[in-house]
Every structure is written in structure tokens, then in C-alpha cells.
Amino acid sequence: MVSRILHQVTKILQNYLAQRYIILPTTLEQQNIVKQRFFNATRFPGVLGAIDCTHVKIKKPSSDVEYCYINRKGYFSKNVQLVCDFDLNILGCFARYGGSTHDAYIWESSIIKSHMLNAYTANGSTGWLLGDSGYPLQPWLMTPFRNVEHASQQRYNDSHARARNCVERLNGVLKKVFACLSQDRGLMEDPSFAGSIITACCTLHNIRKRFNLPLPEVDPPADLSDNQSSGDNVELVHVLNEGRAVRNIITRNHFYN
């Protein structure tokens, strides 16, 4: 009975409430509020959210698919893409892929990436997400400079790190509040239902935020993401060049002096 109830409640949260509480800001007013909050706290302009992936341990899946879920640390997991604002409101949750999948691949397959691309095509560079060096540089996704050659680039990187820190804190909060997401425990479910539980937990987190319930204080976990460099060769040249141009403009206009 407990198992049936768990499945029913999880499906309700995933299929009906997630779309109400996990929302990417799309109107100009909503986006300006998010951007201003990031800028006031970190001096990084135009930020619509911070993105990262985190691994959630699951039980060993069936032998025919287990290779999809073994991660680089040697345990079975889901690699979950999260996007949040500076106040840890979750703007996007994508819990489809297994632990062997690279962060950059998940990003290229996500609905949020398609939304950001469409917005850029329609309006140009009016806002971007912040990702670590495991993500590809794109006009709608700003990453750090890998080889710093100027003090302004270092200031850019420092501000970028302060702004992106929120998603690392979010990962820590989720795993502290929901023990089933923590490394010590994990989800003893098959991969598909594990993804549903992760989405349900993210929905409950946003409901908690909506009603101003307190969250635990956590330090950013030491290693929540797969920080392997994706390499520029995964990018179409023109997209990479446009991303570099946008990053250079940000650096020149906001971090040069």
C-alpha cells in the first residue's frame, strides 16, 4: 500500500504540479527581476539562471542498460540537470539521463536549451545562463575563460563563480532536505521512476520556497558536477564565435576597469 501511494503521489507531483511550480521566466518583467537579483548580488549582468548537473545514486539497473547509468566515479546514478535563480528557486529540472551521460550532451538535448536558442534567434543576446567549463560556450550560455590573459577576464571569472554558486548551493540543499537524493542513501528504484521522484522532490522544494518555509544552510558541496571539459570541437564554429563575442562584450563593458 505504501508503495502504491508513493507512486500515485509522485506521479501527481510530476505530471500536474511540476509545470505549475517549476517555471522558467519568460516575460520581460519576470526576466528583469531575475537579472537584477543576480546583478545586485554579484555584479554579473544579464543572468537568467545558473545551470549545473548533479548525480543522484540509484540501484543497479538491468544488465542490458546498466552501462548507461555507471558514472565516472563507479556507481549507478541519474545525471540531473538543474537551473535555478539566485534565491534557489528551481527554474528547470531534467532528470532523464543516466550517470554516464556528459553534462554538455544533456544540455544539448534539453528543452531549456531550445528555448534559449529560440529567444536568441528572435531577439539577440538579451540574457544568458551561467555554466561551468563542462558546458559549451554559446551566446545564451556563458562559461568561464579557460586561459586567463587579462585582469578583466579574471574579474569576469570571479563574478561568474559567485553568480553560479547558487546552483551548487541548491544541489546541497536538495540532498540535505531529501535524504533519498543524497549520496549516502540514494534511490532504490528503477531509473524511470527514480527520475520521477527527483522531479517530485524539486517540485516540493519550490512549493516550500513559494510559502517561505525555511531551508537548511549548507556549504557548496566539493564536487557535485562532472567538470570534464567538453572541448570546443563539439560546437558549431559560428555559434562558438558568437558566444565568444558576447562574452568579450560582457568583459569589456563590465569588468575591464
Image (cartoon, grey):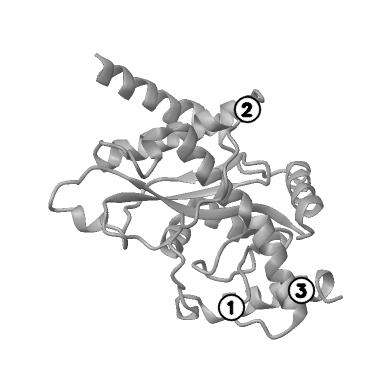
Residue with the mark numbered 2: 214
Q: Position of residue 102 (x, y in %)?
A: 39, 63
Say left or right for 255 vs 237. Answer: right
Quadrant housing residue 9: top left
Q: Is residue 109 above or below residue 212?
A: below
| Tag 2: amino acid | Pro
Taking depth in this image into account, of 71 and 185 the one nearest to the observer is 185
Residue located farthest toward the bottom when viewing the structure as drawn: 149
Give the secondary structure at mark 1.
loop
Instruction: Find residue 82 and report its horizontal and vertical position in percent.
Output: 51, 48
* The one of 256 and 47 positioned closer to us in this rendering: 256
* Residue 210 rendering spot, x and y as whole percentages: 64, 27
Q: Residue at x 77, y 51 (%)?
A: 41
Left or right: 239, with 77 as reference point: right
Find disc 3 in the rendering and name its residue.
251
Q: Quadrant of residue 7?
A: top left
Give the CA separation, mark 3 to mark 1.
14 Å
Q: Nearest to the eye among marks 2 and 1: give it.
A: 2
| Secondary element at image label 2 | loop
Classed neighbour count for the residue bearing mark 1: other residues with Cα under 10 Å, few (<14), some (14–19), many (≥20): few
Question: In what element is the residue under mark 3?
Answer: helix
- Mark 2 to mark 1 CA distance (whole Å): 37 Å
